[in-house]
Image (cartoon, coloured by chain):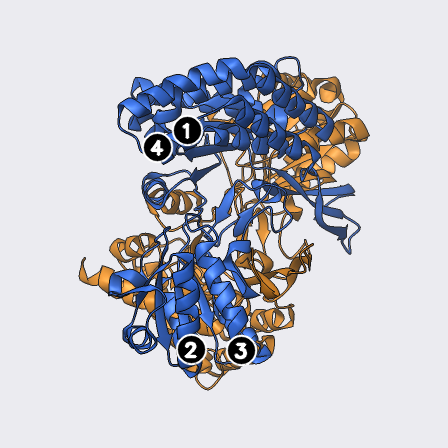
Chain colours: A orange, B blue
C-alpha cells in the first residue's frame, strides 16, 4: 500500500467512525450544525475568497476559458448564496428514522422498516467549489459522513471551505470528521478513494460524462451514475403541433448546457410535413443548428430553412451535444421512435408530445428512462422542480436511486423487529 | 473477445430484448405464464428426474458428501413442491406499476413515481436445482428477464429444467428468452456474465461466502450481496434471563446451517454470573459447543459446564460457523457490545434481549445491520416470516435493497410526468 493509499484509508476510517456517531443524531442537532456552517461561511468569506483567488489566478495563467474561470470564481455574494442554500437544506425534512413500512406480523412480532443513513459517501466532482458545501450539507442532513474529492483546479478554495466547515462543527453535536477532504490532489488519491471498498459505502461522481465513466470503470466501491443526459423529444402522429414546437424548442434551447436538455427530436412521419417547417423556424429563431436526416433536409430545402440545417450522421444520434445543436429524425412509427430511444438514450429523460391517451400509455410503459414526460419539456427533470428541495445529482442507473436524488435517496433502510421472547 | 464471451453477450442481448417486451406486460399475462410453468414441471417431472440422475451419479462418483448429494437430488415429490412454490408466487401481488409517490406540482404537472422492472437479472448460484425455478419465477413475476448460472454439478438438471420452462412459455405472452441459462459450465462463462456491464442490470449471487466474495470482486455489473450472516445476540443488563436463554439457544440451534442463525453471544457482565450457567446448560442440552472468553471459561469451571466449552481465539469472533458452535463473550457495557458488533458483524441480523426501553432504543439506533431484533430470535430475518411471500435472497449491503429481498426489491422506479404543454 502506498503512502497516499494509507492516508486515504485513514481518512475513510475516521469518516466511518464519524458516520457511526452521526447515525443516531436527531434532526435538531444536525440542523444546528448546518446553521453553524452557514453562519461561518458568511463570517469567514474573506478567507475563502482569498484562497479562491489563488485558484483563479492559476487557472488564468493556465489559459483556462473565461467561462470556466467564472464557474471557479467565488465572490462574497456567491458565498452568501451558498450559505443560503445550506439554510434551505435546514428547512427540509430529515429522512432518517422515517418508517417506510411496518405492521404486526401474524405471530405478534412488530415489524418496521425505517430509513437510516448510507454511512460514508464519497463525492468526486469537477469545477465549482460550491459543490463542496452543497454535498457536505446534504450528506450531514441525511446523517452521512462526506468524503470530498474536488478537482485540483479548486484545491485551495476547497481546502479553505472544508476548514471553515470543520471549524463550524466544533461544539455542535456533529463530529468534525463527518466532513473531510480526500488528501492529495493527484489521480492516485482519487483512485485510492475508488478502491476503498468496505470503508466507503457509495461514490457519487458529479461532473461530465468522461469523469462519470472513469469512476464507474475504476471503482470497486458501489457507484451511483449521475447526470449523462442524451434526452429525446418524440412528436407523435396525434401531437398538438403548437405545443410540440414549444416543447421541442424549450427542451433544447432554454438552457442547452445541462443534462436534462434535449439532444434529439424524433418526428412521426404523419405530421412531418406540417411540423418540420414550423419547428425549423422556431429552432432557427432560438439559434439552434439542426442536424437532420434526409426528410428534414428535404423539408428545409422545400420550405426555405428557418434554421441552419446540416446532414446528420450516425454519430449525431449518439452525441450529448450540451450546445445549441439538435439532431432531428423522422420516424415511420411510434415503435421506431421507441427503438431509436432504446438504442441511443442514456435513460435520463424522454418526452412524448401527443393528445392520444393510447400513444402516451404505450410510450410511457415502453420507454425505460428515469423520467418520461408527457406533453412537458425534458427540462423539468430536476430535484427542485420535483419538490425534493435539493439534489445531490440525477441518477441514470436503475439500482438504488433513479432520477433526481434528494435526501431520501441518500439513505438506506433497516428492519427493526420487536417481540416478547419470540422463538422460531 | 473469446467465443464464450461472444455467446454470453448474445444471450444477454436476447435477455435485454425479452426484458423490453416483459416490462409492459400485465399481471394476468405473467401469472398465466407462471401457471403454465408449474403445470409443465409436474407433467415433465420424468424428464427432469432422468437428467438429475446424471448429476447425482456423477456427484456420487466424485465422492460428494451424502448431504450434498441429497441437496442435489430431485424426486417427483420435490418437483411437485417446486411447482407449488411457483403457484404461491402466482398469488403474490405484482409490484410493477405500483405508484410509490405522486401528486400535482405547483405548476400543475402531474408527477408519479412508479415501479418498473430492473431489466436483466443474472443469478449465480450453487447446488440445489430448485433455485433455477424459484429465481426464474420471481424474475418473471417482477417483469425481469433471468440469466441463470447454476453450478456445474447441477448442469444436466438445470438444462432440463430451463428447457421445460422455456417450452412452457411458448404460446404465453411472455417471451421465451425471458428465461435463459448462461452458456458453458466453465469459470470463463461466469466471468463473462460478471463483466457484461450494460447488458446485465444486476447480479445476485446465491450461495456461500466464498461465492459471494468472488462475484463482488470480479464483477463490473452491479452486485447485490446476499446471505453472509455473522449474527450476534446481546444479552443486556436488564434482560429477562429466561427469555435470553431461550432466544440465544433458538438463534443458534434451531437450524444452525442458515445465514440468520447466531454465531456470537455477547453478555453484559452485570448478568454474567446469573446468566452464563443457565445458558451453558441450555446450549449443552441442544448440542452446542461454546467458544468462550476467560469469563465464560471461569463460569463453566465454577458451575460444572453444561456445554462443551473451549477457549475462544480472535478468529472465533470473525467466524460464521454455520455449525453447532457459538462464540460467547462477556462485555462490560452496551457500548462495548455495539463496538464488538461493528467490528465483526456482516451486518445481517443482530438481536438485543432487554426489558429496558432505553437500552433497546440505544441498541436499535446504533447497530447498523439489515435487521435488528429486540427480544426475538435472529432466525426471524426471512422474506416468508416478514410477509413478503418469497425472497430471492437476503441483502447485507446498503444500496438498493437491504434485508430480505422480495418482489418489490427486484424493481426500480421511474418518474412519469404529465403536463399540458408545460415549458420551463
Both on one chain, marks 4 and 2?
Answer: yes
**N-terminal-most mark, 1 or 4:** 4
* Element type where label 1 sits in the image: helix
Residue closest to the far front: B304
Label 2: few (<14), some (14–19) or many (≥20) C-alpha neighbours in 10 Å = few
Per the image, label 3 sits on a secondary structure element best described as helix
The answer to whether mark 2 and mark 3 are in CB contact below 8 A is no
Which class describes the residues within 10 Å of circle 3: few (<14), some (14-19), or many (20+)?
some
For residue A78, above or below residue A375: below
Closest to the camera, between mark 1 and mark 3, is 1
Q: Which residue is mark 1?
A: B72
* Dots 1, 3 in contact, CB < 8 A: no
Nearer the observer, B377 or B172: B377
Q: Are marks 3 and 4 in contact (CB under 8 Å)?
A: no
Q: Of helix, strand and loop, which one carries label 2?
A: helix
Instruction: Specify which label sits upstream in the sequence, 4 or 2.
Output: 4
What is the chain identity of the residue bearing mark 2? B
State the CA–CA distance, disc 1 to disc 2: 44 Å
Mark 4 closeness class: few <14, some 14–19, many ≥20 residues within 10 Å: few
Chain for mark 4?
Answer: B
Left or right? Give the position of B13 relative to A250.
Answer: left
Q: Is residue A146 visible?
A: yes
Question: x%, y% of residue A403?
Answer: 59, 47
Asked if the residue at tag 2 contacts the one at tag 4, i.e. Cβ–Cβ closer than 8 Å, the answer is no
Q: Is residue B234 above or below residue A168?
A: above
Residue plotted at (54% across, 17% down): B45
Of residues B371 and A84, which is closer to you in this image? B371
Looking at marks 1 and 2 on the same chain, the residue that comes earlier in the sequence is marked by 1
Mark 4 vs mark 2, foreground winner is 4
Q: Which residue is mark 4?
A: B66
Chain designation of label 1: B
Amino acid at each position: 500500500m502506498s503512502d497516499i493509499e494509507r492516508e486515504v484509508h485513514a481518512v475513510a476510517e475516521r469518516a466511518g467512525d464519524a458516520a457511526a456517531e452521526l447515525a443516531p443524531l436527531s434532526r435538531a442537532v444536525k440542523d444546528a450544525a448546518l446553521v453553524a456552517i452557514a453562519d461561518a461561511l458568511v463570517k469567514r468569506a474573506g478567507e475563502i475568497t482569498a484562497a479562491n483567488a489563488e485558484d483563479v489566478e492559476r487557472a488564468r495563467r493556465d489559459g483556462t476559458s473565461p467561462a470556466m474561470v467564472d464557474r471557479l470564481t467565488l465572490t462574497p455574494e456567491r458565498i452568501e448564496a451558498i450559505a443560503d442554500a445550506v439554510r434551505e437544506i435546514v428547512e427540509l425534512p430529515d429522512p432518517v428514522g422515517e418508517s417506510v413500512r411496518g405492521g404486526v406480523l401474524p405471530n405478534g412480532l412488530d415489524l418496521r422498516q425505517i430509513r437510516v443513513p448510507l454511512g460514508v459517501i464519497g463525492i468526486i466532482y469537477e469545477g465549482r467549489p460550491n459543490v463542496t458545501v452543497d454535498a457536505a450539507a446534504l450528506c450531514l442532513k441525511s446523517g452521512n459522513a462526506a468524503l470530498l474529492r474536488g478537482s485540483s483546479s479548486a484545491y485551495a478554495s476547497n481546502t479553505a471551505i472544508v476548514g471553515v466547515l470543520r471549524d463550524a462543527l466544533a461544539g455542535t453535536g456533529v463530529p468534525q470528521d463527518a466532513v473531510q477532504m480526500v488528501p492529495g490532489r493527484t489521480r492516485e488519491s482519487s483512485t485510492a478513494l475508488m478502491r476503498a471498498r468496505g470503508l466507503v459505502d457509495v461514490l457519487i461522481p458529479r461532473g461530465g460524462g468522461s469523469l462519470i465513466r472513469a469512476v464507474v470503470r475504476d471503482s470497486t466501491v458501489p457507484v451511483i451514475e449521475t447526470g449523462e443526459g442524451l434526452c429525446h423529444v418524440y412528436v407523435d402522429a396525434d401531437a398538438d403541433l403548437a405545443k410540440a414546437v414549444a416543447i421541442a424548442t424549450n427542451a433544447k434551447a432554454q438552457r442547452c448546457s445541462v443534462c436534462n436538455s434535449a439532444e434529439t427530436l424524433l418526428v412521426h412521419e404523419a405530421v412531418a410535413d406540417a411540423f418540420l417547417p414550423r419547428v425549423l423556424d422556431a429552432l432557427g429563431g432560438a439559434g439552434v443548428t439542426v442536424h437532420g436526416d434526409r426528410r428534414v433536409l428535404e423539408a428545409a430545402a422545400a420550405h426555405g430553412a428557418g434554421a441552419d440545417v446540416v446532414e446528420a450522421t450516425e454519430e449525431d444520434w449518439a452525441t450529448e451535444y450540451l450546445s445549441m445543436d439538435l439532431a432531428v429524425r423522422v420516424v415511420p412509427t411510434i415503435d421506431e421512435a421507441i427503438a431509436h430511444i432504446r438504442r441511443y438514450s442514456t435513460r435520463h429523460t424522454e418526452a412524448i408530445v401527443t393528445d392520444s391517451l393510447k400513444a402516451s400509455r404505450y410510450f410511457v410503459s415502453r420507454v425505460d428512462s428515469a423520467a418520461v414526460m408527457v406533453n412537458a419539456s425534458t427540462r423539468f427533470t430536476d430535484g427542485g422542480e420535483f419538490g425534493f428541495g435539493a439534489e445531490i445529482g440525477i441518477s441514470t442507473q436503475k439500482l438504488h436511486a433513479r432520477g433526481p436524488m434528494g435526501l431520501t435517496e441518500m439513505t438506506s433502510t433497516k428492519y427493526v423487529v420487536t417481540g416478547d421472547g419470540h422463538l422460531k
